[in-house]
Image (cartoon, rainbow, N blue to C red):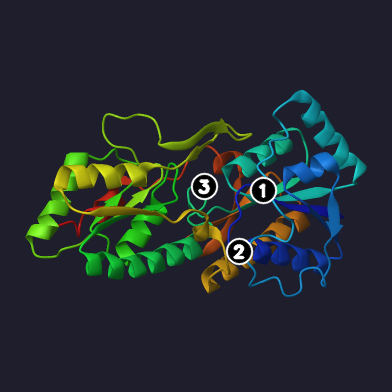
Amino acid sequence: MKIGVLTGGGDAPGLNAAIRGVTRRALSYGYEVVGIRRGWAGLLEKDVMKLDRDAVSGILPKGGTILGTSRTNPFANEDDKNKLLRNIEELGLDAIVAIGGDDTQGVAAKLSDLGYKVVGIPKTIDNDLSGTDRTFGFDTAVAIATEAIDRIHTTAESHQRTIVVEVMGRHAGWIALYSGLAGGADVILLPEEPFDIDEVCSMVKKRYEQGRKFAIVVVAEGAVPKGIEDFFTRSSQKDAFGHERLGGIGEWLEKEIEKRTGVETRSVVLGHVQRGGSPTAYDRILATRFGIAAADLIKNGDFGKMVSLQGEKIVAVPLKEAVKANRVVPEDMRWLAKVFSP
């Protein structure tokens, strides 16, 4: 049995732990394992490397991915699709482990529909992949964002400013909610519900009137004010899966809050720092468990599935279920974003 392992989409802390988990488990079954460089792009170019015990030694605590990654969509056109399928055969891959978010798992689901043996591992710092309660990378991103908010607090208080912290989250506000709560933010704005800018400014002013001469506003990059339907974007260009590059809501809020309240306001965009660096212990363990479970699915011939965390158990769900919708913050949790507002 020859297994190909790839990582696609944005990098996330824990990718190397997942690669190591798959490899070590698969090798124990006597399988051959190769790493596919730069996600699906590597399959289009037959760019692979051998994965053995030496290759995955010492990578557990490292951020990023030793295999590299890309946002390549091999189903974007018929020529690439045919090339992908031909290369899978020429490389002699009996099974593929696809580690990634909804776009990567979407390609995996299409391959599965065509009869190829594919297993998925969920990865995204946004924690927005349906079919699993948690994705690795999220815990680290929240920890990094929380530390940043803690540091920003001291500057905001020293200068009696309001500071807007923009965090990642296109459709789901998990990072904004968790880091905002953990960091003691005064206002938390999520993509799940359009916000009222007048209400935001009222909360900021109320805090100053209460004698607390600073405020922290945490906003997900995908959040929008009422009356505006489109995301704030930094570029009109789209990636291979049709996604625009989001950004700008923090800067917009900075200007609006200062203009409407007269309070000196600044904005900070945490950006890629949220998904860089060494993974937390939780993400290392979760990614390792996912990697082991993926190799076990292959051993048991259970393909077309994605490993998933449900409660504390690792289970397998159909790839189609994993990509059917974004996992957003449910209504019964959104009230937490407002419970500590001024």
Badge 2 is on which residue? Answer: 14
* Residue labelled with disc 1: 8
In the rendered structure, which amino acid carries the disc numbered 2? Gly
Against 327, residue 153 (above or below) is: below
At 57% across and 32% down in the image, what residue appears?
A: 238
Ranked by sequence position, the earlier of labels 1 and 2 is 1
Residue 108 % position (x, y): 69, 41
Task: Mark yes or no: residue 280 visible.
Answer: yes
User: Which one is earlier in the sequence, the residue at label 1 or at label 3?
Assistant: 1
Per the model, the C-alpha gap separating discs 1 and 2 is 13 Å
The residue closer to the viewer here, 226 or 114, is 226
Please tell me how crowded label 2 is: few (under 14), some (14-19), or many (20+) other residues with Cα within 10 Å: many
Give the mark nearest the N terminus, 2 or 3: 2
Amino acid on which the number 3 mark rests in the picture:
Leu
In front: 290, or 81? 81
**Circle 3 SS class:** loop
The disc placed on residue 301 is none
Label 3: which residue?
Answer: 129
